[in-house]
Amino acid sequence: MQPLIPNMVYHIFNHANGFENTFRSDNNFRFFLEKYRHHISPVAETYAYCLMPNHFHIVVRIRQREIIEKIIEVRSSSNNGSNFAKVQNFGKVVDDEVVNNEVTNEKVIDDKTIELFLSKQFANLFSSYTQSFNKVFNRRGSLFLKAFKRIPITNKQYFLNSIVYTHRNPVHHGFCTHFSEWQYSSYNEIIDERSDIVEFEKLLKMFDDKNNFIDLHENKLLDLPFANDNDI
């Protein structure tokens, strides 16, 4: 399986383990995003997300290696709330600023440890959400597929396509007739330029401007290898 590597952009998606829905109510969607902010935002910048009843898509960039190393160091040496809050704040700071002011460029943690830590962050997201979901709906067992899919994004065109595909996915699966109607994606947050999850300013620059962002979504820019795969 493709490892998660610092400073790499990925299209990540996961599906329900079986035929039941992973999100059954508004509270489920909101709670997942709350857990996402807690577990993923410190280690990755998010450029797009879309949650649907039985699966989700996100586009992220794993933060710089120095940031990940610092988080691992702080977490391994902290047992109190103040240090934990310090770690959480890394997800809200521009990477370059943290690197220049708080960490060095030396490789202090090996690659395998970093890969395992990053994968564990996603495992913790799925596990914490599942535990709550199982308690609410009186069920047992896993909820998501254990091996979540991740595709490295290595050029701008593929990045733009992944963003558009993520936001248009509810239309692709028949959950709505227009992607702007789906309230559990980042599309409207980006249009409104108000989000505590998505890096909308950086994203809109990648699309050149907001008008082009809208136009490319309306024009169905979907040059992806899995664009017709009903499983996602």
Image: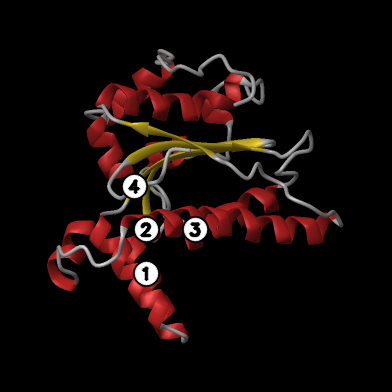
For marks 4 and 2, give the CA distance.
8 Å
Q: Amino acid at mark 4?
A: Ile
Q: Quadrant of residue 231?
A: top right
Q: Amino acid at mark 1?
A: Ile
First of labels 3, 4 by sequence position: 4
Indicate left or right for 188 with 181 as reference. Answer: left
Nearer the observer: mark 2 or 1; the answer is: 2
Contact? badges 4 and 2 (CB < 8 Å):
no
For marks 4 and 1, give the CA distance.
15 Å
Task: Between residue 97 and residue 3, name the one nearer to us.
Answer: 3
In the depicted structure, whether residue 225 falls above or below residue 22 = above
Indicate left or right for 58 with 65 as reference. Answer: right
Q: Residue at coordinates 55% horizontally, 53% vertically from top-left?
A: 33
Residue 111 locus on image (x, y percent)? 32, 55
Q: Quadrant of residue 94?
A: bottom left
Q: Residue furthest right?
A: 138
Q: Residue at coordinates 39% horizontally, 38% vertically from top-left?
A: 10
Name the residue beneath numbered marker 4: 5
For marks 1 and 3, give the CA distance.
11 Å
Task: Between residue 202 and residue 17, name the one nearer to us.
Answer: 17
First of labels 1, 3 by sequence position: 1
Q: Amino acid at mark 2?
A: Ile
Q: Quadrant of residue 187?
A: top left
Look at the numbered disc 2 and give the secondary structure of its residue.
helix
Q: Amino acid at mark 3?
A: Gln
The answer to whether residue 206 is seen in the rendering is yes
Name the residue beneath numbered marker 2: 114
For marks 2 and 1, give the CA distance.
8 Å
* Residue 121 numbered tag: 3
For marks 3 and 2, give the CA distance.
11 Å
Contact? badges 3 and 4 (CB < 8 Å):
no
